[in-house]
Image (cartoon, grey):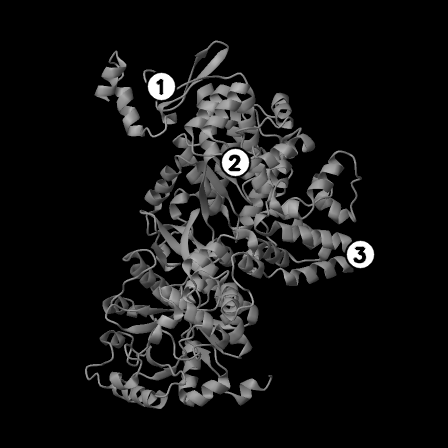
């Protein structure tokens, strides 16, 4: 293979679609990059249709394989023209993003609309244009096309002086020679040079069957009814350079290299710039963050911050300044400040949230004195990883926060990150079954036997249960196609609250499109893409328990969670008895069964409680060892001092996601970058696989450092157990605070807690009737709905033995709030009959 470059001509593929051209492309961006590198291509242009949604994944894969990636997109204009635009530099890239945004924003979700004049407007930017003539689009023959006397080169290509080509796409058809001759004549007449392109839809020929099936799904009919809509052969894959040399003249192949050489832009050159209005005139980001932090410390500690807290703040500020992340913390602080000014309860969590700086800024209520986590574990100069802070807001009032962000920065500078909705076994089976012509009722029977946690494969046993023979050839094809499709993107959806905010127009950084929800726009990249490029997002999330806590605190006259006494013995006694109906996170039966065994006595015990009843620790076999060690039934032993430093706070058992990453570094010799790759694979392996290389690396590294095979096996089982469910310690700490506050309210103010929970429905694990029954068992007087007394919300009244809860009209089934408000407004009339007539 070393002689390939000398024997065969060089080539760069300039027209290639991935499966982010939904229901067209039949290969992942990573597969295309790996295959292009293996074939010795000089470059690969990923040109999904009016989209850059898959470009980050292609960028990461191309770097791994040493392949040059060219960034572009394919467009079908309203006049019928088909063209590919490539971005040679940053200016052209910004124009490409803007063009995609224009097309997407003027159409409904999933569609776009662009005309020749739109393309002409971006010609100034330096974009390269490849016009793709199509031979007899309706009939599929060259001959009809040759009879179209009016067929001419689009006028707008004249604006791309010296930057426009005619794409010659040959796919071993019977008329290739005639078609190439016609394009050569057209090139001579127009002065536009010819270049070879492949219109690639798959990385290998064997994906043709899947590509046909995807086409059938897109058209809404079985494959055997698609006719000429299917490609006539399997040539639209990344082909051997020897094969290309047989099809194309050498000068057309050489032209691909010349075009690729002009494209020097890489996503690595993108630089995120924060909004300027975060920092007042005359201030620097570092100075302004320091000032706000010191003011926050004075607010948090009126008598003066303890020495260790001040030292921690200085340490964190120095690290933030070194990495240049001040603006991120200022952005989150600004959003939180707005929420607090409106009385909206919020709580930060995430990799950087549980820090002294965030506590001082009011982003989190978790006191650093109650936790022992290290800031470097989350904002690491070794990993050079951007910080991550999720802020939960009251679920009833989060929209106010979202609209504040849009109003402050404008829709041209703020948008939500995307979430890539991928095929899982059930949806893959349904779509591929319809494409193959299986009866819908039969497919539905099979689909109902599958669950989302079944992993990648559609199990033959499940097919047999539904009456299908796994040995049948047609069923075998269904299994194979559904297996290939699992993990493929289906469409882009909006992230639950991850905002990207920029200094300049966001559409020059990444394309923006409409979401399905009105008044929402999303960028075309998801959170993993943003992480890969080091771009930061601010998560504005919703949490029902915050709504309930805020309402309960108002009932009892407390301003915020800071006023709740810490480490209350009665609260912990109630928790140990598993008396936790309605309490955040620890109200499920699994949590209730754990509480008497774990017996929480302090805040950190709650942190562990939140994290331990999760599929990761359970599937990894870590729960029982932890409980035995906590109860003194098993000695706490560590295979080394390094491992003890990582696991001492959890008695030698890895419970948190961060601990698994740390173990990989200290015990197996992983670099910070490798540990981060492990973290990403842990989060994705259920959908995509890919953990297998880490197993050998982990076990070999531990063996080389003297650790027993049994220890290495246990750690790897823990990693597999985490899968999609790895729970970080930082998130657990923030949740634990809400556990404690909600438990304290239930313990000391049960009536207010019940009324607040009922007024915050729908939320939680229990129905309103179950919450009422539990409160009555605890001696709370609950009075029924009274049309002459009840408000819309549940309220507190003076009862015989304390406060009583009056159920609100919201508890009356089928009664709309508007009707209830009319009842309340008409209540001054004396009789119920008169009230009913008036309301």
Dot 2 surroundings within 10 Å: few (below 14), some, or many (20 or more)? many
Mark positioned earlier in the residue sequence (1 or 3): 3
Camera-side residue of 778 and 795? 778
- Near-viewer residue (298 or 661): 661
Give the structural element (helix, strand or loop) at label 1.
loop
x and y, in percent, of residue 316 in the image: 58, 43
Q: Residue 325 appears at what percent x and percent y? A: 50, 48
Residue found 32% across the figure and 69% down from its top: 75
Circle 1 residues within 10 Å: few <14, some 14–19, many ≥20: many
Residue visible at 47% across and 46% down?
A: 328
Local SS, label 2: loop
Q: How far apart are labels 1 and 3 at the CA level?
A: 70 Å
Q: Is residue 670 visible?
A: yes
Quadrant in the rendering for residue 46: bottom left
Q: Residue under circle 1? A: 790
Q: On the rendered image, what quadrant is the C terminus found in?
A: top left
Instruction: Identify the residue at image location x=53%, y=28%.
Output: 742
Question: What residue is pinned by disc 3?
Answer: 706
Where's residue 489, x and y in %? 45, 60
Single out the residue that lies furthest toward the left. 150
Instruction: Work out whether residue 751 or residue 440 is closer to the camera in this orientation and state it.
Output: 440
Q: Which circle, 2 or 1, is nearer the viewer? A: 1
Q: Which element type, helix, strand or loop, lies under badge 3? A: loop
Q: Are marks 3 and 2 in contact (CB under 8 Å)?
A: no
- Separation (CA) of disc 2 from disc 1: 36 Å
253 lies left or right of 604: left
| Count of number-bearing discs | 3
Cα separation, mark 3 vs mark 2, equals 41 Å
Residue designated by label 2: 364
């Amino acid at each position: 293979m070393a002689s390939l470059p000398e024997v065969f001509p060089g080539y760069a593929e300039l027209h290639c679609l991935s499966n982010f051209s939904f229901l067209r492309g039949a290969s992942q961006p990573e597969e295309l990059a790996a295959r292009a590198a293996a074939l010795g291509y000089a470059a690969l242009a990923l040109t999904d249709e009016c989209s850059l949604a898959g470009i980050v994944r292609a960028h990461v894969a191309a770097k791994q394989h040493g392949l040059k990636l060219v960034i572009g997109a394919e467009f079908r204009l309203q006049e019928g023209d088909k063209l590919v635009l490539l971005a040679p530099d940053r200016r052209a890239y910004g124009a490409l993003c803007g063009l995609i945004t224009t097309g997407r924003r003027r159409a409904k979700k999933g569609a776009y609309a662009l005309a020749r004049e739109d393309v002409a407007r971006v010609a100034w930017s330096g974009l390269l244009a490849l016009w793709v003539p199509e031979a007899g689009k309706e009939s599929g023959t060259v001959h009809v096309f040759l009879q179209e006397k009016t067929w001419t080169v689009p006028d707008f290509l004249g604006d791309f002086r010296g930057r426009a080509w005619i794409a010659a796409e040959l796919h071993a058809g019977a008329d290739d020679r005639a078609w190439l001759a016609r394009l050569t004549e057209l090139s001579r007449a127009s002065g536009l040079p010819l270049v070879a392109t492949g219109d690639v839809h798959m990385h290998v020929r064997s994906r043709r069957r899947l590509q046909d099936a995807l086409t059938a799904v897109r058209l809404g009919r079985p494959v055997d009814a698609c006719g000429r809509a299917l490609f006539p052969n399997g040539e639209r894959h990344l082909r051997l350079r020897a094969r290309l040399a047989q099809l194309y003249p050498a000068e057309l192949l050489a032209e691909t290299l010349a075009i690729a050489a002009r494209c020097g832009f890489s996503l690595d050159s993108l630089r995120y710039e924060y909004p300027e209005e975060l920092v007042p005139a005359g201030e620097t980001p570092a100075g302004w963050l320091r000032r706000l932090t010191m003011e926050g410390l004075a607010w948090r500690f009126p008598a003066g911050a303890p020495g260790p807290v001040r030292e921690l703040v200085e340490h964190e500020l120095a690290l933030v300044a070194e990495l240049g992340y001040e603006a991120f913390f200022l952005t989150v602080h600004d959003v939180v400040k707005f929420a607090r000014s409106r009385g909206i309860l919020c709580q930060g969590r995430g990799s950087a949230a549980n820090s002294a700086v965030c506590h001082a800024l009011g982003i989190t209520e978790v006191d650093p004195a109650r936790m022992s986590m290290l800031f470097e574990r989350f904002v690491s100069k070794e990993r050079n990883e951007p910080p991550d802070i999720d802020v939960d807001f009251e679920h009833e009032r989060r929209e106010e926060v979202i609209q504040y962000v849009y109003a402050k920065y404008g829709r041209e500078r703020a948008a939500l990150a995307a979430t890539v909705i991928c095929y899982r076994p059930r949806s893959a089976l349904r779509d591929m079954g319809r494409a193959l012509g299986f009866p819908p009722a039969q497919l539905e029977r099979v689909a109902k036997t599958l669950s989302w946690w079944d992993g990648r494969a559609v199990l033959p046993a499940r097919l047999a249960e539904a009456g299908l023979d796994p040995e049948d050839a047609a069923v075998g094809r269904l299994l194979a196609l559904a297996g290939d499709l699992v993990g493929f993107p289906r469409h882009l959806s909006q992230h639950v609250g991850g905002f990207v905010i920029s200094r300049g127009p966001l559409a020059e950084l990444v394309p923006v499109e409409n979401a399905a929800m009105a008044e929402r726009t999303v960028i075309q990249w998801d959170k993993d893409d943003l992480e890969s490029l080091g771009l930061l997002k601010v998560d504005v999330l919703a949490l029902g328990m915050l709504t309930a806590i805020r309402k309960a605190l108002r009932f009892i006259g407390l301003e915020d969670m800071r006023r709740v006494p810490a480490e209350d013995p009665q609260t912990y006694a109630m928790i140990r008895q598993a008396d936790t109906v309605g309490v955040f996170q620890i109200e499920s039966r699994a949590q209730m069964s754990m509480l008497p065994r774990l017996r929480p006595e302090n805040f950190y015990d709650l942190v562990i409680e939140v994290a331990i009843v999760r599929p990761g620790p359970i599937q990894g076999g870590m729960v029982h060892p932890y409980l035995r060690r906590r109860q003194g039934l098993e000695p706490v032993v560590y295979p080394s001092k390094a491992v003890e430093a990582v696991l001492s706070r959890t008695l030698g058992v890895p419970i948190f996601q961060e601990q698994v990453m740390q173990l990989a570094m200290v015990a197996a010799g992983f670099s910070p970058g490798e540990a981060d790759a492990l973290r990403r694979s842990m989060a994705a392996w259920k959908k995509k696989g890919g953990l297998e290389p880490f197993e050998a690396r982990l076990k070999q590294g531990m063996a080389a450092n003297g650790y027993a095979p049994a220890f290495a096996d246990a750690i790897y089982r823990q990693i597999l157990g985490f899968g999609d469910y790895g729970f970080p310690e930082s998130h657990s700490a923030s949740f634990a605070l809400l556990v404690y506050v909600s438990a304290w309210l239930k313990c000391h103010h049960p009536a207010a807690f019940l009324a607040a929970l009922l007024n915050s429905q729908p939320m939680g694990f229990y129905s309103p009737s179950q919450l009422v029954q539990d409160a009555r068992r605890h001696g709370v007087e609950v009075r029924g709905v009274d049309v002459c007394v009840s408000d819309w919300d549940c309220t507190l009244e003076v009862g015989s033995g304390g406060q009583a809860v009056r159920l609100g009209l919201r508890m009356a089934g089928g009664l709309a709030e508007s009707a209830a408000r009319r009842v309340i407004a008409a209540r001054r009339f004396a009789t119920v009959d008169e009230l009913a007539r008036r309301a």
